[in-house]
Image (tube, rainbow, N blue to C red):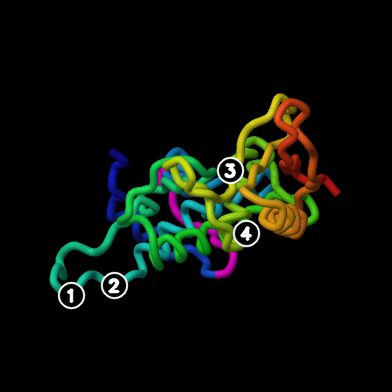
Amino acid sequence: MTRPLTAAQRRLIEAADPGTGRLKGTEAQLTALVKRGLAFRHPRPPHDHFLTPAGHRAREALAEPSEPSEPSEPQAPASTGGVFTARVGGEPVPPATEGPARTREVRSAWQGMLELRRMTNSDASTDRPCAWERTHLVQAAALALEAAGHRPAGAAEGEDGYRVRETPQPDAVAVHAPDAPTLRACVETLEASGWQAGEYTEPRTRRRYVLASPRRV
């Protein structure tokens, strides 16, 4: 189980700049947030620290009011611990994680990703993937799709939706969808999110799929 945030970590996250996510604290405090995946150290001088997408979600969770029936125990969704998993399709999804709460979490994760792009791309561009996305291809592509409102496939047979999978190519993922319109919509979403995407046919099954890779320029 993920450790809860300490009081000091909560204060740091809550005090982060609302626009940029810039953090202020001691080196030890900031390093602890980096280890938890809630912050990153900017590679260029002055090497300031900023919230990651998980950090932005944690701040949003901390800002949510407590349940009236339990005033002493504020809501603490999984994102408070810095753990967010974009749905790649085909995984079991607990019913409790569905609905408006999930929608807010995904929206916050996507906004945090755009901020991460702005802070880490050399030209501050937000229209193409950053280094983190290039090393987490499946998660990054799945987040772009889920944030745009696409529905991931369920775990049960016949629960249709997109599925994002690794490929033998080190810089590309495959996206499968139940029909041609959904497949084309996934292509459009990925292209709008800074990916190069195109439709291909599997030689053995003749099924159509999308091959996508992060755009570099």
**Residue beneath label 4, please?**
115
Query: Which residue is found at the position 56% from the left and 56% from the top?
Result: 146
User: Is residue 53 visible to the viewer in this orientation of the structure?
Assistant: yes
Q: Position of residue 158 (x, y in %)?
A: 49, 45
Q: Position of residue 173 (x, y in %)?
A: 69, 37
* Mark 1: few/some/many CA within 10 Å (<14, 14-19, 20+): few
**Eye-nearest disc, 3 or 4:** 3
* Mark 2: few/some/many CA within 10 Å (<14, 14-19, 20+): few
Closer to the chain start, of discs 3 and 2, is 2
Badge number at residue 65: 2
Badge number at residue 77: none
Query: Which residue is found at the position 59% from the left and 48% from the top?
Result: 162
Q: Position of residue 22 (x, y in %)?
A: 55, 59
Q: Amino acid at mark 2?
A: Pro
Q: Are marks 2 and 1 in contact (CB under 8 Å)?
A: no
Q: Amino acid at mark 4?
A: Glu
**Residue beneath label 1, please?**
68
* Mark 4: few/some/many CA within 10 Å (<14, 14-19, 20+): many
Where are the magenta residues, as a range? Answer: 19-32
Per the model, the C-alpha gap separating discs 3 and 4 is: 26 Å
Q: Position of residue 53 (x, y in %)?
A: 53, 54
Query: Which residue is found at the position 74% from the left and 27% from the top?
Result: 169
Q: Is residue 26 left or right of residue 119?
A: left
At mark 2, the secondary structure is loop
Closer to the chain start, of discs 3 and 4, is 4
Closer to the chain start, of discs 4 and 1, is 1
**Eye-nearest disc, 4 or 1:** 1
**Eye-nearest disc, 1 or 3:** 3
